Structures are given as structure tokens and as C-alpha cells.
Amino acid sequence: MKTLYDIPAPAKINLFLHVVGRRDDGYHLLQTVFRFIDLQDTLQADVRADGEISRSYDLPGVSPEQDIVLRAARLLQAETGTSLGAHLGLDKRIPMGGGLGGGSSDAASVLVALNRLWDTGLDRSQLMQLGLRLGADVPVFIFGQNAFAEGVGEELQPLVLPKAAYVIVQPCASVATVDIFSAKELTRDTKPVRITDFPAAETDFLLQPPQEVRQFGHNDLQPVVYSRYPVVSQAAKWLSGLGVEVRMSGSGACLFAGYHDLQNAVLAKQEIVATMRTAGSEAIRLINSVHACAGLVEHPLRHWVTR
């Protein structure tokens, strides 16, 4: 039987995230820009002839029934009627509960990979529709391009973004997305922007000499997370003391700062890590990990799917 190894599932960051309304069914209307980064999970898929869907890994606190990777495989199997199954492996590098879309990316990569392995023949639009049933962030990873997003995050327009790199800081917190979106204090009436507003300021999220940050828009979820998860706010404040101004991605908890190239991002990461070592227990209490990542031009599996 066939096998695919080292299937990439990259993380995303939200360069801004505005909540512009709420539908009658309770889903929030958003505007955001998704950017893929090269921090990624990797998967493996072995075809099974017996139709079973299984996994070779464990995720803390995630049962097989809850696992979005297995749910994605079963959804594709049910929708296409294939008699084949799969045994799935996952090497998890994207922080869970970090607002980087790790679970959504994993689900998307499984849909794309199994569509190829099982020869089920779904096109991009069909796979995106399946992905939306798993989560609002899944379609953009199947879409395969950095994008301006509206609706619940599924109305996508491609964006060509400038070369950039990022420092991703994971505070010592895991944020439950549903709790943040259900918060009474969440701003839900930000004035909508146009896609044409963004390219004029598309470099504003990058650090400019002398270390000044000018960012487009804001993240409406950030004040709620800062209030309910003080460690995230404290980590941002600690980083600000180093001259690293950060913004939260998605519903958090991960924070990011943008740089013009990977070399500068690596230098910033090294400075943060070195200062953490000398700061001792305070920094260790606030920050779990620091990554330097390049921004991607497109999803590495984009061309595995037909239009």
C-alpha cells in the first residue's frame, strides 16, 4: 500500500484580526490577513486496505474521537465513499492553544494528502467546503495562499505579501478559543476595512529602525486574552521592555513580532533567549518557547490540489 512521509502542515499568523459583527447563528464575522510561516507540524499517512482510520501518536488531552486529524480523514472517507483507510502519524511542533492554527493546518494537510493517496479526486473548492465543516481556519490552508479573509474566515482573496520573518513567542498559557469568542467584553463592531486598505500598509507590521513598530489594524481578541490570561499580557510587557513590540495571533496565546529578514529575526530570538537566561524565574514563568520563522510565499501543498 502507498505511504506519504513528511507531509507539511505550516502554522499561520493573523497580521490583524477585526471582529466586525455577529451572525444570527452566533458565528462571528471577521476580517483578517492570514500569513503562513515555516513553523510546521509534519504528518505521515499509510493507506490501509481495511478501511480503518487510526493514529500512531498521542496528544495530551485529545482523545481519538476529538482528534481533528482523524475527524478530517473520516469526513473525507464518508463524503467520497472510498473503501480505503489510513494510519496517520503526527510530529507536533506548532504550540497547541496558541492561535497559530496548528490543528486546522493538520486537518487541511490530511484532507489534501489523503485526497491524493486515495485518489478521491476532489478539487480545491470541494476540499475547502469539507474543511469548513471541521473549523473556520481550515479552508485557508487548503486555499494555499496568504489571504485577506472575511465572513467567518472562509471568504478568501489572495494577497502577495512582502518578504518577512517573525519571532513567535509562546507564553506559558493555552487559550480556549471558544471562551474568548463568547466573552461579553469582546468588541464585535469594529468598522470594516477594504482589502485595498491593507497593501498600502502591508509593511507596517515590520520592525522599522530604530525598532519602532507600526502595525495595520489590531486584534480585537487581544484585550480579552490579556485580561483573562494575565501571563500573556505580562509576557508582552516583558518583551516590550526588551524593545520587542508584539501582537497576538488569532485567539492567542502566541505573540509575534515582524522583521525584514530571517537573520534579524534569529538575532532577536537569540537576544530574547539570552535575556531569559539571565532574568531567571520571572521570564521562565512567563515564556515557554521562542521561535524564529520565515514567512512563506504559499502553502507547500498548494499544488497538490487542482483548482
Image (cartoon, rainbow, N blue to C red):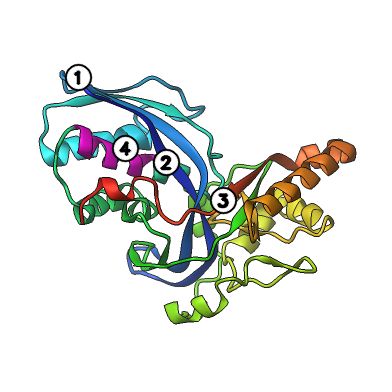
Q: Mark 2: which secondary structure?
A: strand
The crowding category of the residue bearing disc 4, from other C-alpha atoms within 10 Å (few below 14, some 14 to 19, many at least 20), is: many
Q: Secondary structure at mark 4?
A: helix
Query: Which residue is disc 1 drawn over?
Result: 1
Identity of the residue drawn at 30% across and 53% down:
132
Q: In terms of secondary structure, where does tag 3 sit?
A: strand
The mark lying in front, picked from 1 and 4, is 1
Considering depth in this image, is 98 or 306 the residue closer to the camera? 306
Gap between marks 3 and 1 measured at Cα: 35 Å
Q: Residue at x 17, y 33 (%)?
A: 118
Q: Which residues are magenta?
A: 106-117
Q: Is residue 272 above or below residue 55?
A: below
Of labels 3 and 1, earlier in sequence is: 1
Whether tag 1 and tag 4 are in contact, CB under 8 A, the answer is: no
Mark in front: 4 vs 3: 3
Mark 3 touching mark 2, by CB under 8 A? no
Name the residue tied to disc 3.
294
Separation (CA) of disc 4 from disc 2 = 9 Å
Q: Return the residue at label 2.
A: 9
- CA separation in Å, label 1 and label 2: 23 Å
**Does the magenta run of residues contain 109?**
yes
Task: Quote the CA–CA distance across marks 3 and 2.
Answer: 15 Å
The quarter in which the C terminus is drawn is bottom left
How many numbered badges does the structure rendering display? 4
- Could you say whether the residue bearing mark 1 is in a helix, strand or loop? loop
Type of the residue with mark 1: Met
Kind of residue at disc 2: Ala
The residue drawn where x is 23% and y is 53% is 124
